[in-house]
Amino acid sequence: MFISLFGAVESGVIYAIMALGVYLTFRVLDFPDLTVEGSFVTGASVAAFSIINGVPPIIATLLAAVAGFLAGCVTGVLHTKGKINSLLAGILMMTALYSINLRIMDQPTLSLLNETTLFQQLTSIWDAIGLDSVFNGLLSAIGMERFPKTWSIVIVMIFVTLAIKLLTDYFLKTEVGLALRAIGDNKKMIRSLSANTDSLIIVGVGISNALVALSGGLIAQLGGFSDVNMGLGLIVIGLASIIIGEALFGTKTIVRATLAVILGAVIYRIIVTLALRFDFLETGDMKLITAIIVVVALVAPKIIQSRKEKRRRIMKRQQLKAGGDSHA
């Protein structure tokens, strides 16, 4: 049980980077971008192909982000310069990326099991400086269970994800970031102020897909393979993470909203992991579980708000009645 939950947190922290990318398009830009289902695989395939061909894992991971940025920019160009509907532009790019990803990998799946990945290097460094034995020794001294071998990956990825979150927060408070947020609220108003909305949208969608591809490159190295179909349904996972986070932690400020997205991604992975422990559910039911989670996350807040509003009206009615009786 503990190992399963640990694995859920481990993958959830990495998927949180993807969720931040989806947040930029869906919430900030109000741009329903389906490119992410293709750019996630592009990041994975570029990272896997690069590592297999001798590129250092850290450079391969950065190349994955660059590839995602370029894919996002193409989607933005299709929408802004080609005047194609944003949803259709994303679908077209997602479809094109399927063939591009196959070209990059030259086969449906690339294995990294015999290659040195970023996470293997990280674990080796941890072992070399003795932090693994020190940490587990401390846990044993206080009677706690020994952590899995990959605990160092979780700790480093938490710091990496938080660093990306802080950079995203800072970016959204810059002049360009504020313009992107304004485009999502009222594009016509920003255009009337002589802002180059087309360029801003292209950059925004590019950054979003760079984060998605970065997550894909990391997931490929974590799982040990890149598969051409690993991005299917990813947009729903990203939206589920956003909706869960917003429902539980709120969105009053950008800092709070991005933190909610990260926590939502981790909670989503934990919920799926716990759900799959039921005997009547199988791995193939993951899409169904995701759909149910999204439905619950969307409906539950509305039901709760409706009940609060109903109680508020009843209390107000009672107060008015009590006031009327006192005057009588």
Image (spheres, rainbow, N blue to C red):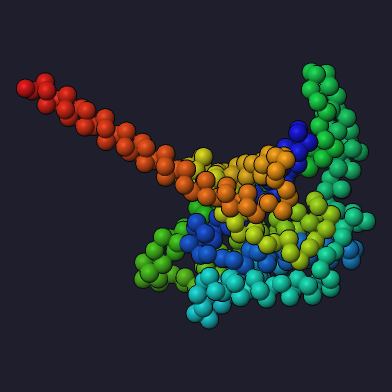
Residue at the outermost front position: 280
Viewer-nearest residue: 326 or 252? 326
Name the side, left or right, on which 78 lies relative to 115: left
| Residue at 52 percent of width and 54 percent of height | 172
Residue 201 position in % (x across, y down): 52, 68
Q: Is residue 287 left or right of residue 78?
A: right
Decide: is 49 above or below 24: below
At 16% across and 27% down in the image, what residue appears?
321
Which of these two is toward me, 142 or 300? Answer: 300
Q: Is residue 288 left or right of residue 299?
A: right
Residue extending farthest to the right is: 114
Question: Is residue 249 something that shows in the picture?
Answer: yes
Give percent across and percent down for residue 242.
55, 50
Identity of the residue drawn at 11% across and 23% down: 325
The residue positioned 64% from the left and 60% from the top of the image is 233
Please state the horizontal and vertical placement of residue 51, each as a whole percent of the image: 86, 61
Q: Return the x and y of residue 188 as percentages of the image width and height.
A: 38, 69
Q: Quadrant of the C terminus?
A: top left
Query: From this viewpoint, which residue is outermost toward the top?
Result: 142
Q: Nearer the viewer, residue 317 or 251?
A: 317
Q: How many marks?
A: 0
* Quadrant of res 224: bottom right
Where's the N terminus, which quadrant?
top right
Residue 130 vertical position relative to residue 193 in the rendered view, above or below: above
| Residue reaching furthest to the left | 328
- Kindly tell me whether residue 168 is visible in this rendering: no
